[in-house]
Image: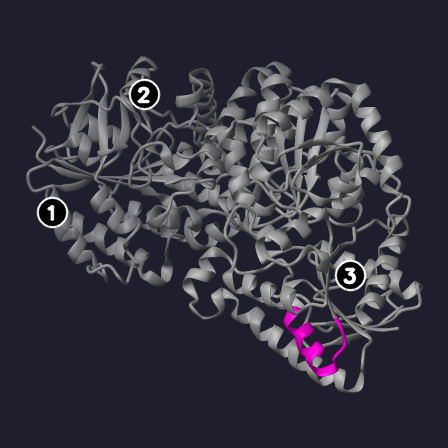
Amino acid sequence: MNKNKGIVLYLHVHQPWRIREYSIFDVAWRHNYFSGGQNPDQDNQKIFQKVAEKSYLPMNALLEKLLKKYPDFKISLSFSGTFLEQAERFNPEVLESFKRLVKTGQVEILSSPYHHSLAFFYSRKEFERQVELHRWKIREIFGAETRVLANTELAYSDDLAKWAEQDGFKGVLAEGWDPILNWRSPNYVYRPRGTKKIGLLLKNYRLSDDLAFRFSDRKWNEWPLTADKFNTWVEDSVRYAPLLNLFMDYETFGEHQWAESGIFGFFEKFVDKWLSVDGNTFYTVSEALDANAPAGEISMSSPVTWADAERDLTAWNGNSLQKEALRYVYELEGEVLNSKDEGLISDWRKLQTSDHFYYMGTKNFTDGDVHAYFSPYDSPYDAFLYYMNTIRDMKSRLRK
Amino acid sequence: MKILMLGWELPPHNSGGLGVACYQMSKALASEGVDIDFIIPYTAKHPGIDYMNIYSATPLPPNYHDLGAYNSGSEEDRENAKDEYGLSPMRAVQRRYGKYVRKFVKNHQPDAIHAHDWLTMEAGMIAKEMTGAPLIVHVHATEFDRSGEQSGNPLVHEIEQQGLLMADRIIAVSEITKEIIVKNYHIPPEKIEVVYNAIDLADLPPHEYDASTYRYLEELKKDGYTVVGALTRLTVQKGLTYFVRAAAKALEKYEKIVFVLSGNGEQRDELIELAADLGISDKMIFTGFVRGKQWRDIYCLIDVFVMSSVSEPFGLTALEAAHHDTALLISRQSGVGEVLNNIMRFDYWDVNKLADEIVNIAESPALQKSLKKNVKNEYARISWQDAARKCLKLYKGALV
């Protein structure tokens, strides 16, 4: 039996194609939903450059340094196709720096639906097409094969695991949510109910969110979080368990938590601290699955995600605006695909990106703040109106 | 004859129909030889108004916050602010306005005072006390109208009550308004004269419709759709939740109808959500606030104009709509219905009736055509000159 204790660091890299303030006066005329707007908050190129400077470039430099310095340092990355398109178009240097990371052999790339969509729950066929598109894109850019699936926003259910097994994946990622786990710890590999071969890795959301959400929060009673303190928590967490799954947005480093918060220095020190003890290591997701047999079976009969207090799909489909928007976009599937019009199909897929529906969220309290932080619009209602106008324009294009 | 006219806004600095009515009435009176001193609460240029003297009571700009003629404090404001029922900024401007009038009349003795709505009623009473000239209070809307089915602001009710009691004569813009004044403010009907608003064709120069402004709606029309809409502030007074519900009912019976709401207001988000709840978001278009060419083009585009007001003293937009070749559906609670015969009527709450009428017109091109044609023959007979002559008679009567 393997005696190592390993951290699985999974970073999710994503940028949506944000819709500009697309008005009724644009419909049936201008089809540039994702560019050409006046408002910098919706300027995808500007936003990409900003995040590149604050997060992608400095974090990749740090990761490259750590990968070279510590052969045991491993990371797992997933890229949305919409991110990769923007990197190719707006900042190839970002893409080159990711390629250098992958070349070290210490980085694993995960599979996900190309357009960061919730298609699994709305159109299984479309989901499969997007996973396939993503597979080809990863091959083309990184020359890599994906073996483990991380669905959009870690949206997971037993059905997803069954699908992943049939499709030949060796594992799936999901949220380690207490009501599901009950007394069990997320720090083990599990077997999804209804499957025979694949493994399930569950996010340790407490320790993950200490970095992703709380790190720079001065009102947090643990602020400031030092590498020593966090290392102690991690050691405590894996005292009797083999692994720790730290899953988060890549943009945690430098964008959600600014450089000024000390996140980069913290991270470097923590990696050093953790690896200084014998038997401590990092795993890629595949290594974690290879090194650890399933400790038990986990079932999630309805969808669980990593978002909002509810950890379900309601961050994207909880209110009637979101339900309407999702209904209309997936209703177009047959017509759009039949059109064989590549531009139309590509735009339709970009409109499936979950962020559009997230911006329409109307939940109150803390989750509402998180939605608003990420939203490029004045209100969820504006997000909805612009979105509905793109749907009208799609219909108009289909009529021609 | 010299008239002191007390108003709150004039075009182009108006937030709605009140400014237009004051402008037109003054212009028509001036052409009857009346000498007018018009006092406004802000300072700004009014190009094209050379038929009367405009005096500014304060140096404030016209868009000074909370100065809008339709603002009588939100429910929330009222609860939060114990003093002046959430109207403090407005009250401060009203006090300055009153002070200015007190000084002004020392050097400008009028033959009669003409005050428009609650906004200037207090100043009207001051002027009456100072000069002994008769006070004519012109009621364009009462607080009962503005607050729809809600209770309204008690302070505004109180000011209206005093003004109506102190007035020598009262002008109401419709029988509906006269009835409200009699019933709710207990004013004897003999003191009240109904003078209808009108429409000045000179202010609606020939407009060449541009089919490229609303391309999407044009496409739908070519496809056989009927465009049903309203140009209105999105506010409770306008009964728009009934309009949206009627839209949903109409769409159950007949598919080729599209609905447009042009305008903005505090009820916008609620209406967007209601349309989503009813599952008709694709057929309910919110254009936002429109002016200029977009304003004229939407009037031209609309086939059926709906005024669903819960309480509409007059409703000038209906006459504008008639001018632009639309069939009119007017709630029985709207004063403009008193001067038009070739319209279809409904009680604002009668969603089924409204839905039926919409479907009937959409399904019958002949009915639609005859409604459009006949109302066009009607509306032009109502003139501001007639309204001004009635006013003049009233001034003279009050002087005796």
User: For the residue labelled by badge 1, is the local secondary structure a helix, a strand or a loop?
Assistant: helix
Front one among B43 and B373: B373
The magenta stretch spans which residues? B121-134
Q: Find residue B102 and report its horizontal and vertical position in percent.
A: 69, 82
Task: Report which residue position mark 2 lands on.
Answer: A160
Q: Does mark 3 fall on the same chain as mark 2?
A: no
Q: Is residue B355 above or below residue B334?
A: above
Task: Report which residue position mark 1 lands on.
Answer: A235
Which quarter of the figure has residue B42? bottom right
Do the residues bearing badges 1 and 2 touch, measured as CB atoms within 8 Å?
A: no
Task: Using the image, tell me which numbered label, if any, was put on residue B22.
Answer: 3
Front one among A118 and A363: A363
| Residue A400 visible in this rendered orientation of the protein | no
Q: What's the residue at 31%, 42% (across, down)?
A: A248
User: For the residue labelled by badge 2, is the local secondary structure a helix, a strand or a loop?
Assistant: helix
**Residue type (three-letter) at the residue carrying disc 3:** Cys
Do the residues bearing badges 2 and 3 touch, measured as CB atoms within 8 Å?
A: no
Q: Find residue A372 and report its horizontal and vertical position in percent.
A: 44, 49
What subunit carries mark 1?
A
Q: Does mark 3 fall on the same chain as mark 1?
A: no
Main SS, magenta region, reads helix
